[in-house]
Amino acid sequence: MKSRVWLSALALSAGLSTASMAQVTGTVKLDGKAPEMPKIDMSGVAQCAQQHTTPVTQETVVTGADNGLANVVISVKKEEGVDLPAGAAPATAVLDQKGCQYSPHVLAVVQGQTVAIKNSDAFLHNVHTLPEKNEGQNMAQPTTGEGKLKTPKEAEYFRVKCDVHPWMGAWVAVLDNSFFAVSDKDGKFSLPKGLADGDYTLHVWHEKFGEQDVKVSVKDGKAEANVTVKAS
Ligand SMILES: [Cu+2]
């Protein structure tokens, strides 16, 4: 009797873990040649330049192994009839300013998520957000420290720039659910676990190469999505 109880408890936990492990992973590849990124000339601003020992280039198009495309936002679309579980309460997202560059270059957050804006440089940056649906912000950060972006409440992709250093630019993607990721330096991504088996549409966004939708079927708790973005 004891062993039977033990067995059914095992079966139950195995079933539960399969569902909660469900995950979409994949790779984004650039179809075509990546345009060469212009070098950023920081020579006029010593306090920026002295933090870099190698040339700094713009990050609009970053590719890695096998033409994998970085900084692509992949998110599950909220569609009728598709039930997306609520994600865990999101941690504070951080957009850093270091060496007169934003890190990360593309930050993805969920609506209502707290976004800290950090200054790792001991001199002035001016955070200037350019949203269309959310409230804009224009905030000086004179030295090292941490401030807060106005909490993004509406889903959209908006640019952040610095009024002191014209080459500084980042993007904030505000998504309407927790199932999103930003592709890494080789174009790889993993959505958070927790999707139920079924059909989904992934929305794919890149700051230069635009947006597209890709269908994906999650079966037995997993799916692989290989996304191609055309270099145009
Ligand atoms: Cu700056």
Image (cartoon, rainbow, N blue to C red):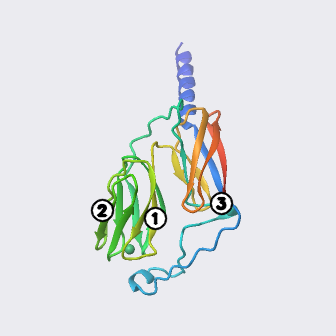
Q: At numbered mark 3, what does the secondary structure look like: helix, strand or loop?
A: loop
Residue projecting furthest to the top: 1
Q: For the residue marked with disc 2, what is the amino acid? A: Gly
- The part of the image, by quadrant, that contains residue 231 is bottom right
- The part of the image, by quadrant, that contains residue 165 is bottom left
User: In the rendered structure, are the residues bearing label 2 and label 1 in contact, judged by CB atoms less than 8 Å apart?
Assistant: no
**Residue 173 appears in the figure:** no
Report x, y in % for residue 228. Answer: 67, 54
Q: Which residue is mark 3?
A: 68
- What's the CA distance linking mark 3 and mark 1? 20 Å
Give left or right: position of 90 versus 53: left
Report x, y in % for residue 7. Answer: 57, 21
- What's the CA distance linking mark 2 and mark 3? 33 Å
Q: Which residue is mark 2?
A: 147
User: Which callout, 2 or 3, points at the residue further toward the start of the chain?
Assistant: 3
Q: Which residue is mark 1?
A: 170
Q: Quadrant of the N terminus?
A: top right
